[in-house]
Image (cartoon, rainbow, N blue to C red):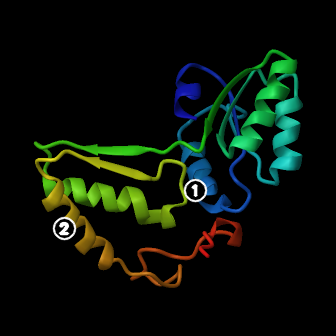
Amino acid sequence: IAPALCYGNSVVFKPAELVPSSAWALAEIISRSGLPDGVFNMLIGPGSAVGDAIIKNRSVDAVSFTGSAGTGASIAQQCATRMAKVQLEMGGKNPLIVLDDANLELAVDIAVQGSFYSTGQRCTASSRVIVTDGIYQDFAQLFAERTRALRVGHALDPQTQIGPVVDSKQLLVFG
């Protein structure tokens, strides 16, 4: 959103339909920024209806999508048929790299927040932590301590650090 606005483009933002609250908060903040009406717009609804309408609209010159590989492939095909620009981020593995000269406390805090906050359900969640040999043992020990101390609970409990996943489709099933 920010780069598109900085380059003078209008934006239509369609967040994931299961988590509209944070998108609504962002839209509220942007609405107070002084942008002219119509420069930033938000649409909420299922991708199969709202997203599809955006992608097929010939007034939309470019599409940026973050989400599943299957949906991204479909979006790429639809954009290609009308020569619209497309940018996709599909299932990135977001590495966090920690080097020997890192502030260990800060690096562990960043790793824990990046991996577990928002229940790990954000497209920018760190799914890999790469640590150099020189600090690996100390990092791993502190990281394990911090993750064991995380409080899992009800989403509305202020003491909760990891709430429930947004949809049962997000659950991993082992067996």
Q: Position of residue 150 (x, y in %)?
A: 35, 77
Residue carrying label 1: 25
Camera-near label (2 vs 1) is 2
Name the image quarter holding residue 64. Answer: top right
Cα distance between the residues tagged 2 and 1: 37 Å
Callout 1: SS: helix
Q: Between residues 143 and 160, which one lies in front from this camera angle?
A: 143
Residue occupying image coordinates x 87% and y 22%: 58
Q: Position of residue 79 (x, y in %)?
A: 81, 24
User: Which image quarter holds the C terminus?
Assistant: bottom right
- Compared to 16, does 101 lie above or below? above
Q: Residues within 10 Å of mark 1 (few under 14, many from 20)?
A: few
Is residue 110 shown left or right of residue 4?
left
Q: Position of residue 71 (x, y in %)?
A: 76, 42
Amino acid type, mark 1:
Ala
- Compared to 91, does 157 lie above or below? below
Residue occupying image coordinates x 88% and y 38%: 53
Amino acid type, mark 2:
Gln
- Compared to 148, does 125 lie above or below? above
Callout 2: SS: helix
Residue placed farthest to the front in the image?
175
Residue occupying image coordinates x 13% and y 61%: 138
Q: Between residues 16 and 170, which one lies in front from this camera angle?
A: 170
- Contact between labelled residues 1 and 2, with CB atoms less than 8 Å apart: no
Residue carrying label 2: 141
Label drawn at residue 87 = none
User: Which image quarter holds the N terminus?
Assistant: top right
